[in-house]
Image (cartoon, helix red, strand yellow):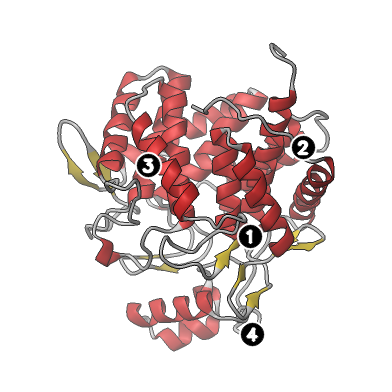
Amino acid sequence: MPAALEPHVLPAALENQLRAACLDTLARGAHDGYLGYSKFDALESPVVRALSFGWWPLRLVWTQVVTRSLLNLRPLLRVRKGVNPEAPALFARANLDCLALGSPDPFTGRAVSCLDWLLAHDASSQGGFHGSCWGYHHAWQSPGFYQPPGSPNCYMTTIVGGALLHGHRVLGRAAYLDAARSAADFILHDLRVIHEDAAEKCIGYVPNVRANFRVININALAAAFLAEVAALTGEPHLTEQARKLMTFVARRQTSYGAWHYTVDPRQSLVAHDNYHTGMILDALQTYERATGDTGFRGCYTAGLEYYRTQLFLRNGAPKWTNSRVWPHDVHGAAQGTLTFALAGDLDSATRIAAWGLEHFYKGDGAFAYQRGRFINKRFTLLHWCSGWMVRGLAALLLAQHRHTLPAGA
């Protein structure tokens, strides 16, 4: 993986539109210092905190009310914009992809700025953790646990760690690899082992939480990240841990090629949703590329076909879940663009990107959040909207560039 690239020519006019949107989004992110609203940042509001009375069910209700509201309630509730580490991680990856397209300026400087910011905001000192780690800048209440601002989690650590690894590969900076290797220790030693046997392993989302909240995609991301670290450091035990985590993920695939968000579907607010499926597929591909282990190829192939046929409409619009079309979420369009670009299916990636550009792009380097059946959410959540879309667009432009290179170039 990726599969052999299909015959594909990106129309010049569309390529120019995608490139312009990508470059404008990268420029705006840098200009704004990656400050923005986040999807689950309701608890940054002093009003919400006061009305929650420190009780977790009310914190969860308020978080979901602000997240699901048709209007952006954050300014009214005095939510402060912040730098979610996911934003500089995504913008760093996109800048590094654009760097591979040609001129080093301004992409090198922007990528270094993002990656150095991430190094400076390592959360490992907050709780005596074994290695580098990252979390959301805001407090977060999920159905399974609560995290104070800055508390690290597996998801954010793998997203940031993956960006650092890519920064090391492209820019050759040892500090990025050192931090990523340190993050592997956080994953292996600070996250609860919920289940482990000779063949498979499942870890928890956050440290210091005893709930059996077995989230499938974070185990896939952890497996891919450990495999990438091992490929650069040559540590067999990291590869072994990666394989056990990925075996857990593969064995939870349904007979028709899908995954639930959690092993117990009753613990989750979503079913077979769009972007978590894409994340698992990207993780499977990353794992195989890093290890050379083709044992999960059938899992990937079945999952990719399910993703293509059941989680997108024929025109490229992202479905919310396999059984629910609305709302069309920008993260679904971004994830589909990224996943199919990495898979070498440039026709699907281009169709999804074109739909996303037409329906989500507001101009001036900003993407809207969601399109509903009757009402659209036109506000921007920086990492969720613009961060993921620019990551997908840059990956597509790079894949197209490589596709058109002469053989052997």
- Earlier along the polypeptide chain: callout 2 or callout 1? 2
- Quadrant holding the C terminus: top right
Residue topped by disc 2:
107
Q: Nearer the viewer, mark 3 or mark 4?
A: 3
Three-letter amino acid code of the residue under disc 4: Leu
Please state which of residues 375 and 174 is positioned toward the viewer in this rendering.
375
Q: Which of marks 2 and 1 is in front?
A: 1
**CA separation in Å, label 4 and label 2:** 36 Å
Residue topped by disc 4:
76
Residue 175 makes an appearance in the image: yes
Three-letter amino acid code of the residue under disc 2: Phe
Q: Which of marks 2 and 3 is in front?
A: 3
Q: Position of residue 332 (x, y in %)?
A: 55, 56
Please state which of residues 176 and 270 is positioned toward the viewer in this rendering.
270
Q: Which residue is drawn at 49% across and 54% down?
A: 275
- Earlier along the polypeptide chain: callout 2 or callout 3? 2
Task: Name the mark on residue 385.
Answer: 1
